[in-house]
Image (tube, grey):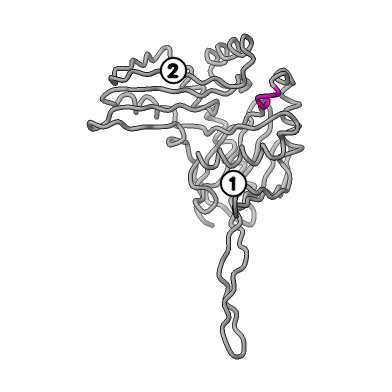
Amino acid sequence: MKMATFVCLRFYVVPVDYQLFKQNIPDKDKINLFKQFFLVNKNYELGKDVIYAMRITHNDGNLYFGKLSKKGSVEKRDITPIDVEDSVVDDWPYVNFVFDVSGSVQLMIVEKNNDIYQDVSALKFKLSKMAKKVMAYSGFSVNFEPIVEKLAFWRIVGEAEGVYSLRFKLESPNMLGATVRARGFLKLVQKRFNNNKLETRFVNSDGKLEIPRNRVEPFVEYADQGGGSWSLLVGRDGKKKAYTSSQNVVTAQERLDKSNPVPVLKKVVDYFKTLL
């Protein structure tokens, strides 16, 4: 059995911009739409010669197990009585995944593999694009955000020579388990403005931006638990350097039996739930 590395993303079913009147649809109904349209066997064309495929191989209550595959090609060599002939055939490398669609969790565990996706930011984009193709007609889209190392944000701030900017992109407050202060604020904003996400940016062009921990901590925690993302522009070694939450994702490692991945995926789900 090989050693596999896993990342965890939380997903959010949100109204598309022209369907914000659907904001008040119960979360249970949103999850049912997600299962109906996205958790199915389907191929997705995401660009010229870029084809992904999702296959659901097993279902156990709120857990949906499957494989995410990307179309490629390999050279094949066949022996004949008089020659060795070259040909090119389709190849579908894949990663194993599991979705937990229980309302209080809403997460996806997926193997890391650079052949399928370059990094977590690329994975987020591709999954959202796939979901949009099948869910847009229902009036909803799906956003994905990773679970981030708990102290990564404050480590970067603490080691910085100065902070030039801080940006938060936070999803609608339909995530249970996140910090109460952040959820309360986001619910108040949503009630007032009917928004499905909140973006805010703080800037000091001289690199003297103050980051008051007691005010910022709830929103960092909300983002780190998969509720959004943050980005920092700081001074390091006399230069400006950018950092993002997606560069600091939590990972888990387990030996994976490709012929029976379900037990290990369940174990990894339980581990990531302890971080919420």
Res. 124 in view: yes
> Is 69 situated left or right of 60 in this image?
left
Q: Position of residue 38 (x, y in %)?
A: 71, 40
Q: Which region is colored magenta? A: 15-19
Residues packed near mark 2 inside 10 Å, few (<14), some (14 to 19) or many (20 plus): some
Q: Are marks 1 and 2 in contact (CB under 8 Å)?
A: no
> Is 8 situated left or right of 157 in this image?
right
Kindly identify the residue that appears in the image at 71 percent across and 41 percent down: 39
> Is 50 situated left or right of 217 in this image?
right
Q: Position of residue 48 (x, y in %)?
A: 59, 52
Is residue 1 located in the magenta-colored stretch of the structure?
A: no
Kindly identify the residue that appears in the image at 53 percent across and 15 percent down: 182
Q: Outermost residue toward the bottom?
A: 82
Kindly identify the residue that appears in the image at 55 percent across and 51 percent down: 116
Residue under numbered circle 1? 264
Q: Is residue 270 above or below residue 159?
A: below
Query: Mark 1 belongs to which amino acid?
Result: Val
Give the mark, 1 or 2, whose residue is nearer the N terminus.
2
User: Residue 217, which numbered label?
Assistant: 2
Depth check, front residue: 223 or 252: 223
> Marks 1 and 2, Cα distance to the nearest angstrom?
33 Å
The secondary structure making up most of the magenta span is: helix
Query: Mark 2 belongs to which amino acid?
Result: Glu
User: Residue 22, which numbered label?
Assistant: none
Q: Outermost residue toward the left?
A: 238
